[in-house]
Amino acid sequence: MSEVAVRTVALHKRFGALVAVEGLDLEIKRGEVFGLLGPNGSGKTTTIRMLCGLMVPTSGTGTVAGFDIVRESESVRGAIGYMSQRFGLYDDLTVAENLRFYSTVYGLHGRERDARLAEHSAALGLTERLGQLAGTLSGGWKQRLALACATAHRPQMLFLDEPTAGVDPAARRAFWQSIYVLASEGTTILVTTHYMDEAERCQRLAFLSRGHLIGVGTPKEITTQFNQPSIEEVFIALQAKDEGAAA
Ligand SMILES: Nc1ncnc2c1ncn2[C@@H]1O[C@H](COP(=O)(O)OP(=O)(O)OP(=O)(O)O)[C@@H](O)[C@H]1O
Ligand SMILES: [Mg+2]
């Protein structure tokens, strides 16, 4: 199996006159915890949607888990898990029904699915809540359920779009522990976040600004490249420059 989990070449996405992603060249190694950072509207979610095979690029190419994101988007979807921004849970379905729905979409069926879901819910501490409507869960439990929905089929690659937005510090910490466990089992993880302490936890980072990739590297390499004391300062300096350019 290839050591490269994600590769894009000159990936573009336009919405009418708006260029959301422009000329993105990205490479993510297998087993990496890779952070995608950038201000609101910089193209993170659009990039993830293209990589998940959910949105067709305007131009450029990409592979995920060895599959072409346009021609083999169905195979891409079988190899990945996607936790969307705001989690994408069905509030009027129970925890068990959400799990069953997502695992079916990801290709698990019948007894294999039910056995896997029982094991998976127990491992994530969801067993007690299987009958509860997802809409009545607290933010932290919603997050845990969304992660469970994205991982029950044991994907090789996981896309997490702001998975910790709106959850408390204890839930954030627990979530990152789960991410490291998944990574130690060989799962490649692409995560977006606006929390800079989380950015520092990634092995490598990519910075997007108005759809452009403006820096890639380890947190240390990025702070050195931009000559700033921390990732937070890099982010703020880039954003100030961005706003200056927009003015
Ligand atoms: N379906 C769409 N139609 C038109 N414009 C879109 C669409 N999806 C995204 N955009 C625009 O593309 C740009 C990039 O949006 P995107 O959601 O990828 O940013 P983001 O980095 O994920 O932002 P955030 O941090 O707020 O989640 C924005 O200007 C957004 O308004
Ligand atoms: Mg987004």
Image (cartoon, rainbow, N blue to C red):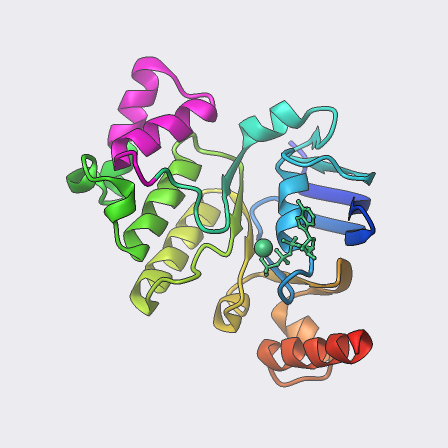
Q: Is residue 105 above or below residue 177?
A: above
Query: Which is more toward the observer, 2 or 122?
Result: 122
Camera sees residue 113 = yes
Residue at x 60% of width, y 76% of height? 231
- Residue 125 sits in quarter: top left
Q: Is residue 70 above or below residue 107?
A: below
Q: Is residue 60 above or below residue 77?
A: below
Which quadrant of the rendered structure holds the C terminus? bottom right
Q: Position of residue 188 (x, y in %)?
A: 55, 45
Q: Is residue 17 magenta?
A: no
Q: Which residues are magenta?
A: 91-118
User: Dividing the image into four equal quarters, which quarter contains ligand 2?
Assistant: bottom right
Query: Which is more toward the observer, 17 or 138?
Result: 17
Please give left or right for residue 126 compared with residue 46 in the image: left
Residue at x 48% of width, y 48% of height? 183
- Residue 117 sits in quarter: top left
Q: Position of residue 224 (x, y in %)?
A: 71, 79
Please give left or right for residue 90 compared with residue 221 in the image: left
Query: Which is more toward the observer, 29 or 25?
Result: 25
Q: Position of residue 55 (x, y in %)?
A: 67, 36
Q: Is residue 114 magenta?
A: yes
Q: Is residue 36 above or below residue 194?
A: above
Residue at x 64% of width, y 67% of height? 39
Q: Residue furthest top?
A: 110
Report the number of numbered marks. Answer: 0
Please give left or right for residue 65 compared with residue 169 in the image: right
Q: Position of residue 207 (x, y in %)?
A: 69, 64
Which quadrant of the rendered structure holds the N terminus? top right
Residue at x 15% of width, y 41% of height? 128
